[in-house]
Image: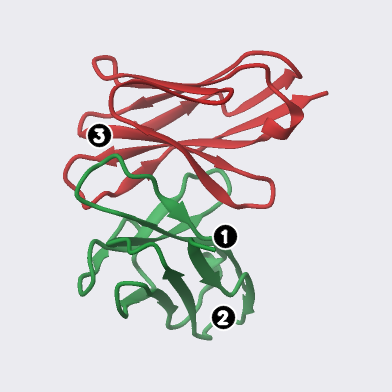
């Protein structure tokens, strides 16, 4: 079993739809990091959270520590949101090391 | 602009050649990392440096060496490149001391070994 698992692998939506990407993680991971990778390859940090919920613009990230599950939501999706979204788990005792999920390829059609 | 600078952006090597990927950050971050990204797989840690003067192996260190030259710079060296090292390489950095600082990634190096 992978230490960080994302679903779905691929997601296609119409502009304006509400999008959810899920991430499950193993015992020993103390925080979750959500990243966005653009078609050009650059990786941008979106959120890092260890409890509760964070919001930035149309992006919302939540984490449930008991269930070891995190979600990334995009409200009112737009074609410019098309990218690969990656969740990564931060280990409690590892020098801030991350273990990455395989990513979710999101395509938002106009 | 503040951030992580990686060079080169693209490189083609012949099997057996050597090269060094350079990474520098200007955010006074303590920790620096080298990852590789392959199709169908998540980013995998090659080596990391939790602080200046220390380096440690990650998940896939074989065939690589690193140097933390100073607090700003962390280089990755391939001594004898192999086709299996064809990948996209990312350098990243973060502060340490708390687990809630974000990471900053370089723009990546696309390496092809023929």
Residue B13 lies in quadrant: bottom right
Determine whether the residue tagged by mark 3 lies in a helix, strand or loop.
strand
Residue ID for mark 2: B15
Residue at the left extreme, as displayed: A93
Place of residue B54 in the rendered image (x, y in percent of width and height, measured from the top left): 20, 70
Using the numbered discs, state the Cα–Cα distance from disc 2 to disc 3 in whole angstroms: 38 Å
Q: What residue is rendered at 59% in x and 75% in y?
A: B8
A37, above or below A95, in the image: above
- Chain assignment, label 2: B
Residue B79 lies in quadrant: bottom left
Colour of chain A as rendered: red
Nearer-the-camera pick, B48 or B36: B48
Residue ID for mark 3: A29
- Mark 2, Cα crowd under 10 Å, few <14 / some 14-19 / many 20+, is some
Question: Mark 2 or mark 3: which is in front?
Answer: 3
Colour of chain B as rendered: green
- Mark 1, Cα crowd under 10 Å, few <14 / some 14-19 / many 20+, is many
> Of the residues under marks 2 and 1, which one precedes in the sequence?
2
The answer to whether marks 3 and 1 sit on the same chain is: no
- Chain assignment, label 3: A
Q: What residue is rendered at 49% in x and 85% in y?
A: B18
Determine whether the residue tagged by mark 2 lies in a helix, strand or loop.
loop
Residue ID for mark 1: B107
Q: Are marks 2 and 3 in contact (CB under 8 Å)?
A: no
Residue A59 lies in quadrant: top right
């Amino acid at each position: 079993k992978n230490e960080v698992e994302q679903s779905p692998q691929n997601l296609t939506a119409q502009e304006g739809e509400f999008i959810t990407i899920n991430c499950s993680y193993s015992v020993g991971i103390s925080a979750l990091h959500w990243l966005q990778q653009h078609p050009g390859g650059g990786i941008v940090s979106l959120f890092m959270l260890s409890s509760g919920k964070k919001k930035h613009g149309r992006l919302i990230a939540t984490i449930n520590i008991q269930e070891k599950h995190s979600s990334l939501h995009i409200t009112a999706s737009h074609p410019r949101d098309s990218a690969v979204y990656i969740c990564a788990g931060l280990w409690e005792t590892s020098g801030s090391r991350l273990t990455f999920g395989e990513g979710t390829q999101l395509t938002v059609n106009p | 602009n503040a951030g992580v600078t990686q060079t080169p952006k693209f490189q083609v090597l012949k099997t057996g050649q050597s090269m060094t990927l350079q990474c520098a950050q200007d955010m006074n971050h303590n920790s620096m990392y080298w990852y590789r990204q392959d199709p169908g797989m998540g980013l995998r840690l090659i080596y990391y440096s939790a602080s200046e003067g220390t380096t440690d192996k990650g998940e896939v260190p074989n065939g690589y060496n690193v140097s933390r030259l100073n607090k700003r710079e962390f280089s990755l060296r391939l001594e004898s490149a192999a086709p299996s090292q064809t990948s996209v390489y990312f350098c990243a950095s973060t502060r340490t001391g708390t687990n809630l600082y974000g990471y900053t990634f370089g723009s990546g190096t696309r390496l092809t070994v023929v």
